[in-house]
Image: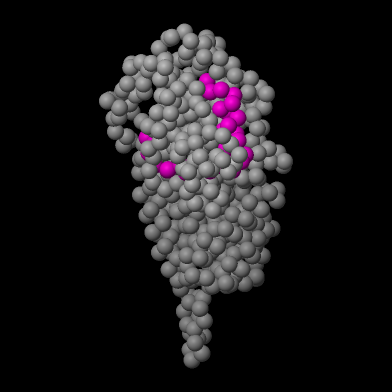
Amino acid sequence: MFPESKVLLIGTAPVHAESIAMAAADDSCHVKLNHDALTLIGRSREVVEHVAASGERVYGLNTLLGSGRDTAVEEGSILAYQVQVVRYHNSGVGPYLSRAEARAVILARLVGFSRGGSGVRPETARFYADLLNRGVHPAIPAEGSVGSSDLTQLAAVAAVAIGEGEALDASGVLVPGAKALADAGLQPLTLHAGEALALVSANAYSVGAGTLALLRLRHVARLADVALALSLETIARYDGGGNLSPFSPAIQSAKAVDGQRESAAAVRRLLSGGWLEDVRPEVSVQDPLSFRAAPQTHGAFRSGVGQLAAALDVELNGRGDNPLVDLESGQMVSGGNFQPMQLALAFEGLRLALAHVGIPSERRIAKLYPPQRAIRAKHLAAAAGSGLVQEELPGLLWYSAAGLLAELKFLAAPATLGAPTLSADVEDHSTLAPLALQQLVKSVDAVEKLLAIEALTASYLLLEAGAAQPLGKGTAAVVGRLADVLADRPSAPELVEHARRELRIVVDGLRQGGNEW
């Protein structure tokens, strides 16, 4: 977490994905490099200058890149070569990243500089901090990286830094990079030997945008438990279900899965103080698996989110540069730390986990459909001769949920296995981490809508059932919030989007109120 003063101080100590995401999402957060980081960056630069002066052949410092790795660059052309590297790699296509994503890319690369493996000058690192602090928003195309360094996205940032490329102004209008710098009071950066490759050769898109996805995934983990708790309350009223024994400490302590225990505990907290806590003799001895085994599914998902957080922290705190500046030996060493395989596989696995979160959610919605039909039949009978009042819940949201589930299953297919061989068969394996991330973001969007539909459906039925039995403290808070959303009777798309916004607020509020999920 960064302090309330909204300053993210980057030193040489470990940084964590959540802090990067929060700073990227908040334009008012000021970023500073401390003395230790600047000293380490300076020492790293000294190694580069020493190696360059020695005449030793080093990839990207005094040679071409990729298949041209063994072709020397004349000493007199090295500064011009920096510009060529940036222009050559600035080849991305597709829609531009959001402002938060662009900030996350720059911030992740800045953190990379602070680890001491890149060999950029302290002035260059400070310049990247200035881009963030003065609101320069490079226009970064989303597509073009195969996940062996996010070359095209980082080149779009570097192009603006040297006074070329394009940026987006505060209104979202494309402007020349030089104008964006001038408006921010910055002069274009002149790159020194080896800096162009250091600017573009990193996984700062996959890592930076990945931290933003991590925050959303943590919200989904909490939201899934909220939707489940609401559905438990609902089937208790309409179908004799709502058996809480699967969520008991006895069951959860019988299997050592942390995420599972956390999910079950979250559901118990949401339902605390409500009538489901009292054992009812008439309650079904076992609810369907979409209710009874949900902690196991939600718990596995939570474990996957934890693995992603760990993979992001590894990338943020590691040195993925190629060539790597090794301070201990004083050498620049070629390697493959730019290949974020662990991160790519975390993106892959979470899409599959999200599909499994979606399957029981859609099944629970299906089981809530008969009470909806009964209520609609009652409303129709009551409307004889007096006109039918528009109902608060659109009738076929279940079908929309089924469509979203089909999308989740489609998105769960592997993305990382399809990279072709590039650069004259030198770059013959890539992670496709950016594609895996982009598909993950689509999956998060779909599952948020699906869970919002479940929460809306359950809340509608609970409101129709009245207050004969008290809701849990947590579920009551959610139903109260969604009651206002339903009462507005918006169109189905507006209803779901409004519910998603309100659920973000209420779920976060429940967490801050002492229920750490």
Left or right, 265 with reference to 497: right
Left or right, 422 with reference to 328: left
- What residue is shown at x 52% (from left), y 43% (from top)? 179
- What residue is shown at x 65% (from left), y 41% (from top)? 29
- What residue is shown at x 72% (from left), y 42% (from top)? 4
The image quarter containing residue 435 is top left
| In the depicted structure, whether residue 188 falls above or below residue 294 | above
Tell me residue 18's x, y (percent): 59, 39
| In the depicted structure, whether residue 365 falls above or below residue 334 | below
Tell me residue 360's x, y (percent): 45, 54
Image color mode: one colour
Which residue reaches farthest right? 5
Tell me residue 229's x, y (percent): 57, 56
Residue 487 showing in the rendered view? yes
Q: Depth check: give the residue in front, 123 or 380.
A: 123
Q: Depth check: give the residue in front, 352 or 442.
A: 442
Left or right, 147 with reference to 162: left
Q: Depth check: give the residue in front, 414 or 359.
A: 414
Specify the segment rendered in magenta: 118-146
Magenta run includes residue 143: yes
* Image quarter hosting the N terminus: top right
Magenta run includes residue 211: no
- What residue is shown at x 63% (from left), y 24% (from top)? 37
